[in-house]
Image (cartoon, rainbow, N blue to C red):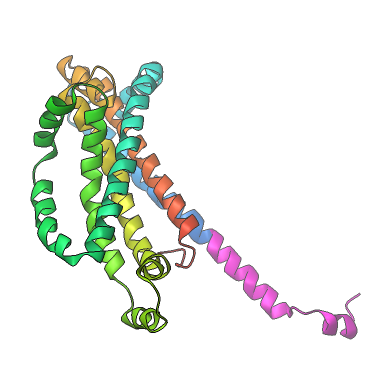
Amino acid sequence: MNTPLAAAMDPTPPALDEEEARWREARRRERRRRRLTPALGIVGLLALWWGLVVAFDVKPFIAPSPWAVLQTLYAKRAVLFDNLVPTALEALGGFLLGNLVAIAVATLFVHYRRLQEIFFPVVVMFNSIPVVAKAPILVLLMGNGVEPKIAIAALVCFFPTLVNSVRGLEAVNPQAMELMRVLSASRREIFFKLRVYAALPYLFSALRIAASMSVIGAVVGEWIGATQGIGAMIIQATYNFDSPLLYAAITMSACLSGAFFLAVVALERFVIRWQPEHA
């Protein structure tokens, strides 16, 4: 029974309960909107693609319809998955290797400015070389195995992570840095308790880019010389004028890039808990 005594003993006023309920409902609506909007964009793109194919009577060997690509994805799902696995492993290996080396080099650059002044222009110049030009050199040096594919994916991931890591490690609040020095903090303590936290948002922004770029690097490496993988499948489908299989392989690579990107986003939300959800 709702008596004045029970109301007095209730620690949560009714107005606060209603406000919290409205806030939770608004949050659920925002989450549904954020999930529905990309789905509508994908559906709209597929509808536009289908409409253009039908309106201009495009031949199937030039550009198949989305339905033809979907049928190929289902009919040849075993072959596509068998070729997706090596590409995923190569992209994952390149992603881990390239980012770990980039973080290590960024740490050296921040602590030793002379090294940054000497070698950072070299890194920029090396990054300006197109990936398709680096790939044959790596294949000649490492052979035709999985190593050059991982190396190409690592090189693609290296530069954006290096640039963002250097900027993040240097983006420290001057007052916080001065306080750490007043407290006689060591370089190690400053790095792990101050610089790392300042660099995490920058680092994850770079990891989002690298997650997608690693798949591109692995596919490009397979173009140069491979007997399996999504890149090799794209080359074979192109030479055979198998347009539905070509588009299906590209769709699989896009889905792999999206899966890597979402994995990085999930890791970012788990690690960086002090940022607002919409950031």
Answer yes or no: is residue 164 visible. no
Residue 117, quarter of picture: bottom left
264 left or right of 105 in image: right
**Which residue is at 16% across, 60% downward?**
115
Q: Quadrant for the N terminus, please.
A: bottom right
Q: Position of residue 183 (x, y in %)?
A: 42, 82
Q: Nearer the viewer, residue 261 or 146?
A: 146
Residue 198, quarter of picture: bottom left
- Residue 188 vs 210, above or below: the answer is below
- Residue 229 vs 276, above or below: the answer is above
Q: Position of residue 28 (x, y in %)?
A: 55, 59
Q: Nearer the viewer, residue 240 or 230?
A: 230
Q: Position of residue 249 (x, y in %)?
A: 29, 26
Classified by dominant secondary structure, the portion drawn in magenta counts as helix
State the residue lying farthest toward the top.
240
**Which residue is at 38% across, 42% downward?**
260
Q: Nearer the viewer, residue 48 or 187?
A: 187
Q: Position of residue 134 (x, y in %)?
A: 11, 36
Q: Quadrant for the C terminus, please.
A: bottom left
> Magenta part of the protein: which range?
1-28
**Which residue is at 35% across, 31% downward?**
88
Say if the magenta span includes residue 162: no
**Which residue is at 40% across, 66% downward?**
197
